[in-house]
Amino acid sequence: MSELLSVESLACAYGQQTIVSDVSFGIKQGEIACLLGPSGCGKTTLLRGLAGFNPISAGVIRMAGEIISSATHSIPPEKRRMGMVFQDYALFPHLSVEDNIAFGLKEQKRSQRRAIVLSMLELVRLPDLSKRYPHELSGGQQQRVALARALASRPRLLLMDEPFSNLDTEMRKELSLEVRDIIKQQDIAAVVVTHDQEEAFVISDVLGILADGKLQQWGTPEALYYQPNSLQVARFVGEGELYEGACLNERSVQTELGVLEFAEPLGFQSKDQLNLFIRPADLSPIPVAEGHAVATVLSRDFMGEATRYRLKLDNGRVVTAVVRELLSYREGDRVSVQVAVHRPIVFPA
Ligand SMILES: Nc1ncnc2c1ncn2[C@@H]1O[C@H](COP(=O)(O)OP(=O)(O)OP(=O)(O)O)[C@@H](O)[C@H]1O
């Protein structure tokens, strides 16, 4: 399928200061993309560049093959057929819910406008609140109205800037799943900016990691999690620690956790040095056993679905293991550390 949005070598700047540069990615119709990155890395700047609120300093943005932005040419935001949802909802406080939703529909006939507002209220599950004002709504309800307003003008692309960050954890999860369903139902594409990895995984089909003003990697959440192209990306999409290793052969590596055996060749040869990135879910405490590193249990946190252990290896290093099984180890117990890495993440030393 051809791309709906295509971004090529994009750069955005404020005055002389370049904020993001050399960003390229593409999104297909019906696809939800997330831009994930730490605070200040330029996510909002990039999104505003896509929307046309900020000029871009280099590169090209195309929608369905048509150039909408380059360093010398820019289609105004209202002509781009993009809808925008802001972090702080940005509802008009003096307008009711229905008038907020109808705001961008001035060119439509009154009856048509009414029909769209009603269908949008159904879509975001607020059919009974049309007469209320923003200050009479919860944060989650305000965000639903903002979404309804953005979708009312039938955009081809929805842009969302940290849409759930003002909501509590429960609401954030619930609404991100619901928003995903709504976007899919409408069969439009979306770019969602967030600094929350869990939220990004829940909502996105494709994910870009933005750091230091550059797009570090672009791919499915699974690809970024299992095949990160750098340590920075690996750490950004989940917890883990780096372990130095010496290859004994193509499939086994000597590390401080013992000799680790892998089902597939690692792409390294005997005596090569490498770094293995191992996630807490790949480690678990077991009874002290030969061939495994020995550790003392420092802490045990039962989290419901899993238990998190902090284990101090005898060489002094503290490692974290997260196990789903309910084990009986307690603080002070002596254990060994079992490693079961199904998809090794390896970086050259
Ligand atoms: N209008 C502006 N003029 C000058 N610099 C700006 C302007 N807006 C943002 N910046 C700077 O650009 C950089 C990127 O800001 P941006 O808001 O895009 O980051 P972000 O990744 O969205 O951060 P956050 O997650 O905290 O919202 C920051 O260093 C910020 O100070």
Image: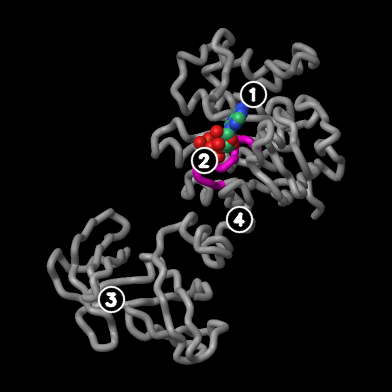
Question: Which label belongs to residue 149?
Answer: 1
Quadrant in the picture for residue 281: bottom left
The magenta stretch spans residue 69: no
Question: Which label belongs to residue 24?
Answer: none
**C-alpha distance separating marks 4 and 3:** 33 Å
**Residue 147 visible here:** no
Report the residue at 71% width, 37% height from top: 50
- Which of the two discs, 1 and 4, labels the residue nearer the N terminus? 1
Q: Secondary structure at mark 1?
A: helix
The N terminus - image quarter: bottom right
Asked if disc 3 is less than 8 Å from ligand 1, the answer is: no
Residue nearest the observer in this picture, 262 or 246: 246
> Looking at the picture, does residue 264 appear above or below residue 149?
below
- Which of the two discs, 3 and 1, labels the residue nearer the N terminus? 1
Where in the figure is residue 92, as x and y percent of width and height? 58, 14
Pair 4/2: label in front = 4
Label 1 environment density (alpha carbons within 10 Å; few <14, some 14–19, many ≥20): many
Q: Which residue is mark 4?
A: 216
- Which of the two discs, 2 and 3, labels the residue nearer the N terminus? 2
Where in the figure is residue 69, as x and y percent of width and height? 81, 37
Pair 2/3: label in front = 3
**Looking at the image, which residue sits at the far top?**
94
Residues rendered magenta in the picture: 36-46
Where in the figure is residue 16, as x and y percent of width and height? 68, 35
Question: Which label belongs to residue 337?
Answer: 3
Q: Which residue is mark 2?
A: 176
